[in-house]
Image (tube, rainbow, N blue to C red):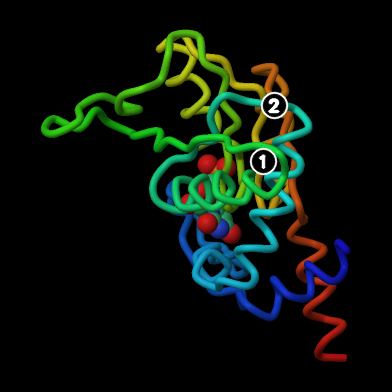
Amino acid sequence: MTLELAALVADASPFVTGERSDGTVLPDYFDGHRVLGNPALLTRVADALARRVQQVGADFVAGEATAGSSLAVAVSLASLRHGGGTPSRIVRRESKPYGVTGILGTGVPPGSSFALVDDVAGTGASLERSTRRLRRMGHRVVGAWVIVDRHAGAAERLARLGVPLSALLTLDQIKSARTASTA
Ligand SMILES: O=C(O)c1cc(=O)[nH]c(=O)n1[C@@H]1O[C@H](COP(=O)(O)O)[C@@H](O)[C@H]1O
């Protein structure tokens, strides 16, 4: 299952040269939007994540804009197929000053539990930011789920916060799948 998924993801999303938010250039930048924009692959990924989230249980599935929040919507939809029906929310970086203001919008009772999702875990800075933001609002984060873990410190960083990280794939698995397909 993992090898097959790695091959599908490798095929859908060729690595590009990309810059991290701290300015570091990565020659193997993974563009998660190539997975999010592929309906068959997104369905598969969202199903796998929804199954894992369902095992832990959360009131909401949420992510930061844009990849995380898009994935949260897909996982929420997929949760209907896995005995759930978990609603999704965007964790905004800043409170919207107009319309529905606030970080999460409306309809989130105090003390709610959240499953965080994102396309990629690198250093874990993004998931830590969301975790801290939700906790400041009095909510709980039961875990973080990503499509790809780059193994760049995210699991350790989140563990220090008491948030377990689960990934469908590692970057190395995608690289191996790519090598195998070109051999
Ligand atoms: O910046 C990254 O490390 C990164 C690497 C990569 O291969 N693909 C990728 O999308 N990213 C971005 O990095 C974010 C996570 O990085 P960290 O906050 O360092 O964990 C993701 O939400 C992406 O915006």
Residue that lies at the very extreme toward the left in this rendered image: 98
Q: Nearer the viewer, residue 83 or 150?
A: 83
Q: Is residue 40 above or below residue 52?
A: below
Question: The C terminus appears in which quarter of the rendering?
Answer: bottom right
Q: Earlier in the sequence, mark 1 or mark 2?
A: 2
**In the image, residue 104 above or below residue 178:** above
Identity of the residue drawn at 43% across and 49% down = 21
The amino acid type, in three-letter code, at marker 1 is Trp
| Whole-percent x, y for residue 74 in the image | 54, 53
Q: Position of residue 68 (x, y in %)?
A: 49, 47
Q: Closer to the camera, 171 or 40?
A: 40
Real-space CA distance between mark 1 and mark 2, rounded to the nearest whole angstrom: 12 Å
Q: Residue at the spot x=44%, y=9% of the render?
A: 110
Q: Residue at x 60, y 31 (%)?
A: 115
Q: Which labelled disc corresponds to residue 57?
A: 2
56 over 31 or under it: above or below: above
Q: Seen in the image, is 174 located left or right of residue 73? A: right
Q: In x, y percent, where is residue 81?
A: 68, 50
User: Camera-side residue: 83 or 160?
Assistant: 83
* Residue 41 appears left or right of 173: left
Mark 2 surroundings: few (<14), some (14-19) or many (≥20) residues within 10 A: some
Q: Is residue 182 left or right of residue 109?
A: right
Q: Is mark 1 within 8 Å of ligand 1?
A: no
**Image quadrant in which you'd find residue 53:** top right
Quadrant where the N terminus sits is bottom right
| Numbered badge on residue 136 | none
In this figure, which residue is indicated by the disc labeled 1?
Answer: 145
